Amino acid sequence: MSKSLTWIWLFIIILSTGCSSISLTEQSNVHDTLILDASRTIGQTFRARFDGMNGIEIYLEPVDFGNGKIQLTLQEGPNTEIFGQAGHPIGDISSPGYYLFPLPLQSESNQQNYYLRLEIEGEGSLKIGTAPGYTYLNGALYKKEQPDDHRQMAFHLSYAVPQLLLGLVGEFLTWTGYILIAGFLFALPGWVLLGFVLPKKEETDWFQKLAISIGISLVIYPVLLMVTNAFGLQLGWLYAWFPPILGLVIILWCQRNWFREKSLERPRLRFGWFDPTLVAIILILFFARFWIIRSVEIPLWGDSYQHTMITQLMLDYDGLFSSWQPYIPYYSLTSHFGFSAYAALFSWISGTNGIHATLWMGQILNGLAVLMLYPLALKISQGNRWAGIGVLLVSGLILVFPATYVNWGRYAQLAGQAVMPIALWMLWEALDRDHWSLRLEWPRLMLAGMALTSMTLSYYRMPFFYATFVIILLFFWGLPKWRLELKKWGGALMRLFIVGIVGVILFIPWGIRLLGGNLAGAIETGVTDSTSFEQISQQLGNLSAITGYVPLLFFILVGITLLIALLQRNWMVVSLPLWYFLLVAYMAGSTIKLPGANMLQAFSIMIGVYIPIGLLLGWGYGQILQFMQKSKVLFAGTSLLTILVAVWFGWQQRTLLDLHQHALVLPPDQKAMAWIDAQTPSNAQLLVQSFAYVGTGAGSDGGWWLPLLARRANMLPPQYAQFNEVSQPPDYTQKVVALIGVLSENPIYTPESIAALCDWGITHIYHGQGQGQVGYNVSPLYLPEDLRSAPDLFTQIYHQDRVSIFAINPNTCSNQP
């Protein structure tokens, strides 16, 4: 049975079993076994994933029948308080399989850490099923109360259904609260501004207005932080509270007569399929985004680390900053900051820390980035609202992009792609005017220019996406519309010029920061030095990886949709694939020194492909629904089928999370970080697992996060800082890479490595649950076995689960020549 059907049956069982229990797999691989007899104990640390844990199933095989029994003891950790015990007579273990040990109900077990200990009381022995250490992330097998880095026990957890469901209800209420916070932040300010730039006679359906309002709010905040910082103002929590409250006050004042007017109207009840379908898809979209991270506490992979640190620094400094202290020795900020601004806003409202805010704002923005395509879909389809639903379904639930961004922490690009559709919609709206009037149009043009600035502050590559869309807009929409009417072309180009000038002027405060920095130098290098054909060929070859993310069926559907659009002479729809082809062509232009072309990446282009594919197939879906409206039965059936498809693909998205490949910090790391915070000197300097990457160092397990989670220094800054920022000493990044180079070429106990560690002032060494292997084809920089083999140099001071911490002995460095 497939995993999908298994989970469907699971929900059916939950609904039908009432007060019974269900068993969920934790570590089911059985590659080997360990003998358990009266002379030893075997344990396992683990984390429960739901409330209501009431039992544990262990894989057992009979060996030597006797009159004894196997006893399971549940604790918080080795040698801690006992939560419950259960046992089986050894004689009952008659065949290999999983055997249930019922335990006292743990009502609030969700995301709690536990330790189970197995022992034999009396005579007899059994085999315990085990698997390699990498098969389970949240703990390790223990032998005689000591962790085994290389094994995991085979076990399942049992949960009481009522407590499990009650716990999920509580989580859903928390998620609802996060949605309300997002609505407060990103709907109210934009709703007010939209009222000034969009006259009432031009207002459209409620969701288009809401989506545009959210987009405008996303535009406002980065520009607000940049401008206030330029004037020396750090407003802190006022950034989050003032714009929405002001917006709410203005809305209530403007609508003060609304209730009285509405009470005089006769209610009109009219059922339509559009609104229920739309609301259902939006709820499913955000439910899928939130479910995927319900068991995640720390954002994934390296990009998340740098975004989280920038977010936390914004919270520490009440806005934008220059110094990265106390976390790392860097003293400038030139990196794009839009996403971290949104995460800081979320933190100021919700009261959560920067880490939690980064994780959840990432998923909220992942949903909003899809919702922002709705107005653009309506524009392309000339007002077909079902095309808007189509783009939400395809881009938000069926395609793996952008949902899979959660694995990479690709939040900067996500923020830029959330603002870009609204920036393009605003520009299109500004161009779609028959008569030129600056007096009437300046609010639209100012807002469109601000959107261009905000989009750039969120992700520096977005102007290339924007500019290539403008080219196809002018050629495939403007040319058929205006033909050779020079007056209309003049008005359109004047509007376009004003939008660009406003965007440039607003960007100037930030542009001044960039002058002379690494980013400006990289752009200058792209103009003065061309990229080789071999490098471009390699980049273009990387685009072939798209077939691993977008199934062949979609390319067939894209081809069919393009053919239909071509027959209907809908040139704007036909041009959507050309949009991304132009991006690829501009990237290839780095061979002839096109400005900024060297900044484009094939990967960034590829993972943004959900935008043109979603808009294209959304338009096709809208055409189908338009045709279906001729038959009420077919129309209703198609609407219901749309919701069912959304449910199916929304549930499939939970499988996109890849913790084994991308989770740097795991629950055992979090326990170790708390120990480090409490037990090590505040001036400790830790070596962490890392590898060299494009002239920088990158982390390969949870040790990278030490400055944020344990308030202790390590030798490895976030990559944004290494790539873009100024350090003290100036060659700090080069020193990081040099240290990694020495350790990768020499075992850690050799004189060369010891000299490098002592030169750095390293006092401790961290080896995380990820074993220095998180990433693609990454090998550990050092092994705990090597450190244990040199007790005269290193002392192990912590070993729980698969995490080890060593102290460098005081005489290690003093004995160096």
Image (cartoon, rainbow, N blue to C red):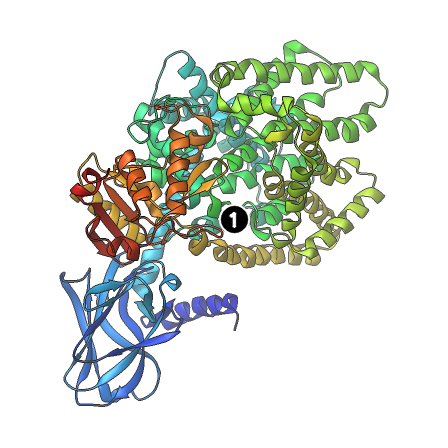
Residue matched to label 1? 404
Looking at the image, can residue 777 be seen? yes
Quarter occupied by residue 455: top right
The C terminus - image quarter = top left
| Left or right, residue 670 beside residue 695 | left
Give the residue drawn at x 20%, y 86%.
Answer: 124
| Spot occupied by residue 561 in the image (x, y as percentages of width and height) | 76, 48
Q: Residue furthest front?
A: 817
| Spot occupied by residue 775 in the image (x, y as percentages of width and height) | 46, 50
Looking at the image, can residue 272 be seen? no
Q: Residue furthest top?
A: 439
Give the residue drawn at x 68%, y 18%.
Answer: 496
Give the residue drawn at x 55%, y 49%.
Answer: 281
| Spot occupied by residue 628 in the image (x, y as percentages of width and height) | 73, 53
| Spot occupied by residue 585 in the image (x, y as percentages of width and height) | 72, 34
| Nearer-the-camera pick, 774 or 441 | 774
* Three-letter code for the amino acid on which mark 1 is drawn: Thr
- Whether 707 is drawn above or below 89: the answer is above
How many residues crowd mark 1 within 10 Å: few (<14), some (14–19), many (20+)?
many
| Nearer-the-camera pick, 283 or 82 | 82
How many marks do you count on the picture? 1
Give the residue drawn at x 37%, y 44%.
Answer: 743
Quarter occupied by residue 618: top right
- Whether 643 is drawn above or below 300: the answer is below
| Nearer-the-camera pick, 641 or 480 | 480
Q: What element does badge 1 sit on?
A: loop
